[in-house]
Image (tube, rainbow, N blue to C red):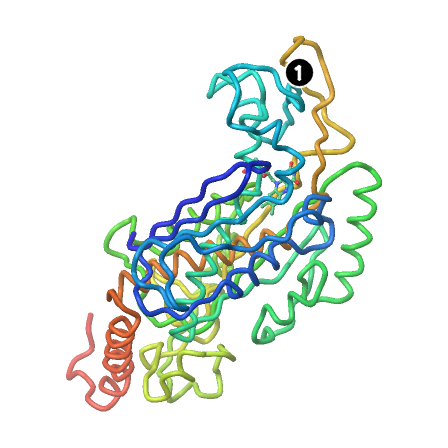
């Protein structure tokens, strides 16, 4: 990995810290670009009271000077406004093992509470849930926003939209609107299907009344990628594996599909694989309405001069980008904290109990999509750095343009000077 990121911070601690290493010098960036994604992560119908308390914003600690990255590690601080209500409970001062207010001894099924208490030898599950909480993903989104800015320099756009919630499926328009987030962010559940949206909102209200929670699926779509990011030569360089690993690390995410996904396993190959054509035969078959890389580099072809008659592969073959849009779907289970709590064991008394019902979301699938965008942006920025390197954005751009110029000419060369014999 060329790009590294780390996060620190507890849900009700003083602040979160986000650290990104490996971003080249000369990337224009301001706090507003990061704050915009933090704001998007806080939205979504069905969120709990916490999101009304916080107003997430970053403060630069390092790595940015005069509105530009300088190549050094980028550190960002995000204050938890809720800290004011939790200072006594969460303070670093005190004696080990002391019993504090808001101790958690009734672990929630589906959360990290019980396993964490056993593994880390704790008596209070708060020591576990404070870090297991998805509040941590705020710092991931900050890191992802920096990666998104780097990708945008090369005409790459990362967006997402909701495809199912609580068992209700949305039908997305084809082609998808561009830019995708401008359309999906306008919906309270980030879906492009107004009829499904109304049903989903009713289902969230019903679940809330019943003290229950809901899961769902988001689809992340990336336009403007050049052919050939990632590699088939080593397992840990395959882009599909790198994407799936990062996406599966999001709390409550239980599945990732690329392109046609699991459905491909049920169909014959003739219905799955996308036929290849030369671009000259395919101008009317343009499957990518944005193709921002083309707009940036009108003489270059980000797809090597070839096109696919479809995109069931979701923009990946052999662990490498094909240049078609990347399409990844991410499934999130229902939130583990139920207001009508599930059965558990009280760790203080050993008796049967109801699991703790701390203030919580009914669903957070729309927000999960913003986190998934961040994870995808970080993987892709890493793959861009792997392919094009460079200590400055200008150096990276020279490498990128040189590659597009030579790769983009390949189809024309093949067409104009065909090989004498057909290969076996
Ligand atoms: C954006 C987002 C918000 C979440 N909000 C909550 C919440 O309010 N309450 C809760 O119990 N779990 C919430 N979760 C899920 C838990 O963080 C997650 O289920 C838990 O950490 C256990 O991890 P696992 O589900 O990956 O096993 C949220 C997850 C995400 C991605």
Q: How many marks?
A: 1
Q: Nearer the viewer, residue 8 or 77?
A: 77
Residue 159, by quadrant, is: bottom right
| Residue at horizontal 53 percent and vertical 14 percent from the top | 97
Q: Nearer the viewer, residue 286 or 342?
A: 342
Decide: is 277 above or below 378.
below
Q: Position of residue 164 (x, y in %)?
A: 67, 55
- The residue where tag 1 is placed is 345
Decide: is 188 above or below 291.
above
Decide: is 51 above or below 119.
below
| Residue at horizontal 44 percent and vertical 88 percent from the top | 283
Q: Position of residue 360 (x, y in %)?
A: 70, 39
Q: Position of residue 370 (x, y in %)?
A: 56, 57
Residue 85, by quadrant, is: top right
Ligand 1, seen in the image, is in the quarter at: top right
Q: Nearer the viewer, residue 38 or 351?
A: 38
| Residue at horizontal 62 percent and vertical 42 percent from the top | 333
Image quadrant holding the C terminus, namely bottom left
Decide: is 112 above or below 16.
above
Label 1: state its secondary structure: strand
């Amino acid at each position: 990995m060329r790009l590294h990121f780390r996060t620190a911070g507890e849900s009700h601690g003083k602040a979160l810290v986000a650290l990104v290493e490996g971003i080249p010098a000369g990337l224009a960036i301001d706090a507003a670009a990061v704050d915009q994604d933090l704001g998007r992560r806080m939205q979504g119908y069905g969120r709990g009271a916490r999101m009304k308390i916080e107003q997430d914003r970053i403060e630069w600690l390092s790595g940015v000077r005069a509105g530009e990255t300088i190549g050094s590690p980028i550190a960002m601080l995000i204050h938890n406004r809720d800290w004011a209500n939790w200072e006594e409970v969460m303070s670093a001062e005190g004696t080990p093992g002391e019993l504090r207010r808001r101790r958690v001894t009734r672990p929630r099924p589906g959360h990290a509470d019980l396993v964490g208490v056993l593994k880390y030898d704790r008596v209070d599950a708060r020591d576990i849930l404070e870090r297991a909480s998805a509040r941590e993903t705020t710092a991931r989104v900050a890191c992802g926003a920096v990666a998104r800015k780097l990708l945008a320099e090369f005409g790459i756009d990362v967006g997402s939209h909701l495809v199912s919630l609580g068992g209700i499926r949305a039908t997305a328009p084809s082609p998808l609107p561009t830019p995708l987030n401008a359309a999906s962010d306008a919906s309270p559940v980030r879906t492009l299907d107004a009829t499904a949206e109304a049903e989903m909102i009713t289902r969230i209200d019903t679940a809330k009344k019943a003290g229950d929670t809901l899961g769902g699926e988001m689809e992340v779509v990336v336009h403007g990628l050049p052919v050939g990011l990632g590699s088939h030569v080593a397992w840990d360089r395959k882009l599909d594996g790198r994407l799936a690993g990062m996406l599966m690390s999001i709390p409550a995410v239980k599945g990732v599909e690329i392109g046609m996904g699991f459905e491909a396993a049920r169909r014959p190959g003739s219905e799955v694989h996308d036929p290849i054509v030369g671009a000259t035969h395919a101008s009317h078959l343009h499957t990518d309405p944005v193709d921002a890389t083309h707009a940036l580099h009108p003489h270059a072809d980000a797809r090597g001069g070839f096109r696919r008659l479809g995109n069931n592969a979701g923009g990946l073959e052999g662990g490498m980008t094909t240049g078609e849009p990347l399409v990844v779907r991410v499934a999130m289970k229902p939130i583990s904290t139920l207001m009508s709590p599930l059965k558990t064991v009280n760790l203080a008394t050993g008796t049967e109990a109801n699991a703790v019902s701390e203030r919580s979301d009914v669903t957070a699938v729309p927000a999960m999509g913003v986190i998934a965008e961040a994870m995808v942006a970080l993987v892709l920025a890493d793959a861009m750095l792997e392919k094009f390197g460079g200590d400055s954005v200008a150096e990276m751009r020279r490498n990128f343009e040189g590659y597009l110029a030579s790769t983009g000419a390949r189809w024309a060369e093949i067409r104009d000077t065909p090989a004498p014999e057909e290969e076996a």
